[in-house]
Image (cartoon, rainbow, N blue to C red):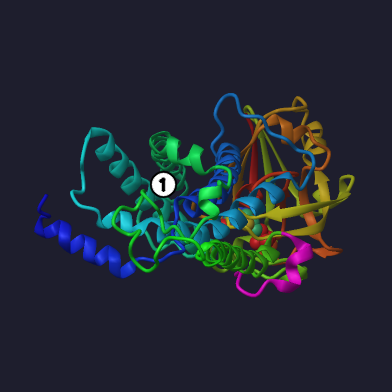
Amino acid sequence: MKKSEPQRLTEALAAKFASPTRSTRLTVVLGRWLGISFTICFLTGLFSHGLQNPPSWMFFPTSPVWIYQLTQGLHVTFGIASIPLLLAKLWSVFPELLKWPPVKSLVHGLERASIALFIASSLLQLTTGLINTYKWYPWPFPFRETHYWLAWVIWGSLLLHIAVKLPAIAAHWRLRPADREAAAPATADVGGLTAVGHEPGAGNTAPGRWSRRAFLTGVAAATGTVVVTTAGQSFSWLAPANVFAPRKMGTGPQGVPVNRTAADAKVIDQAKSAAWVLMVRSGSSNRSFTLAELRALPQHSHDLPIACVEGWSQMATWRGVRVRDLLAAVGAPAGSELRFTSLEPEGAYRIMNMPAEYTQDEKTLVALELNGSELDLDHGYPARIIAPGRPGVLQTKWLQSVEIL
Ligand SMILES: Nc1nc2c(c(=O)[nH]1)N[C@H]1C(S)=C(S)[C@@H](COP(=O)(O)O)O[C@H]1N2
Ligand SMILES: [Mo]
């Protein structure tokens, strides 16, 4: 059969990019790694989203206190690890894009569409997520909602992709003798490439096998490097190796990084005002506490982390009034749900709801001190919330009022 012009052109291009390293086996191995990484990101992401935007069935674990530090650390770390893995996987299959005709059948068309959607949404997800860890939000859409819905798009298209590719995945899940043989560049899967770059046959066994191994080792090394040089923002034992992550442990006032300063939040005057009081509203009755009155209540110390959604976290010693003692002091029922408002005049973190699981927990504090001294203005002076196991965004600084819901 005579080949069409586009077919000849794409075949010539494919031949130009051919590499004996590519094979279905390589793609399957990378797909497995990426699958694990994406699954961890997805589950930890659902947990994080649920904590911030709880569905009715949401559970709120308050222990261990570092649970969110762990899940969000894994989320951001595996998100970063997914970048080299995804790039490697794209490299392993990209001559497929050059096949002509682009759509051969309904199933083939579906497969192409699901891959296009998967690649586009994954790239967008990983790049915006990474940029986000640098506290940079250069887009007009709300990050968290977009990130959440994109995750579902990724999973939908990924499941479709896996379903279509199941035969190839099953065939290459375990290393077959054929995978071991020759460099076998993509064999039948990437049609037209077999003859390029290498003559199949005896004597070629070692180079192909080793080039795949070498490639996978290289990908593993690249992934390991980006993980080791960033994961120290979340995992203290890796903190000395943290070269690239934006937040360094132990920096900032009182040894804790600051996400938003009092100046940025425009609260300096109100926070420093001698007239500051914490208003506690229960139904129609109000009661206010001056800083001296809060200090006169029983003080408790707990070691709790700030664990930011952006991945960085930091353990610290907080001291202040138990939220449940405050409830008791105004005669509110134990385990009430609460709404805290910050002095901050505007912004997403001005108002925070706290479910009963946290208000009941003895470790949930209206903190007045951090690491042995009065709260720094940037850490929420005169009073802030610190609760076990919650995302940093919910650890409200510069408290103004508490409402019993
Ligand atoms: N009122 C208010 N509280 C806030 C924020 C804010 O912007 N405004 N930022 C939150 C975020 S995103 C984090 S990670 C923590 C960080 O606390 P730190 O700055 O004391 O480390 O504070 C939280 N509390
Ligand atoms: Mo945060």
- Does residue 255 lie above or below 366 as drawn? below
> Crowding near pointer 1: few (<14 within 10 Å), some, many (20+)?
few
Q: Could you say which quadrant of the image residue 53 lies in?
A: top right
Q: Tell me where residue 138 sits by quadrant.
A: bottom left
Q: Is residue 24 magenta?
A: no
Residue 85 rendering spot, x and y as whole percentages: 52, 58
Q: Is residue 204 left or right of residue 328?
A: left
Instruction: Determine if residue 323 is in view.
Output: yes
Q: What's the residue type where badge 1 is placed?
A: Thr
Residue 5, picture quadrant = bottom left
Query: Magenta part of the protein: which range?
Result: 235-246
Question: Most extreme residue toward the front, as rendered?
Answer: 202
Query: Would you say 190 lies left or right of 299 here?
Result: left
Q: Position of residue 373 (x, y in %)?
A: 84, 65
- Report the label total: 1
| Nearest the eye: 198 or 85 | 198
Identify the residue at image location x=49%, y=39%: 171
Q: Nearer the viewer, residue 94 or 284?
A: 94
Decide: is 276 above or below 41.
Answer: below
Q: Which residue is mark 1?
A: 146
Q: Is residue 397 visible?
A: no
Left or right, 384 with respect to 139, comes to: right
Where is residue 40? Give x, y as percent.
Answer: 60, 45
Q: Position of residue 270 (x, y in %)?
A: 61, 60
Please state which of residues 213 and 56 is positioned toward the viewer in this rendering.
213
Position of the C terminus by quadrant: top right
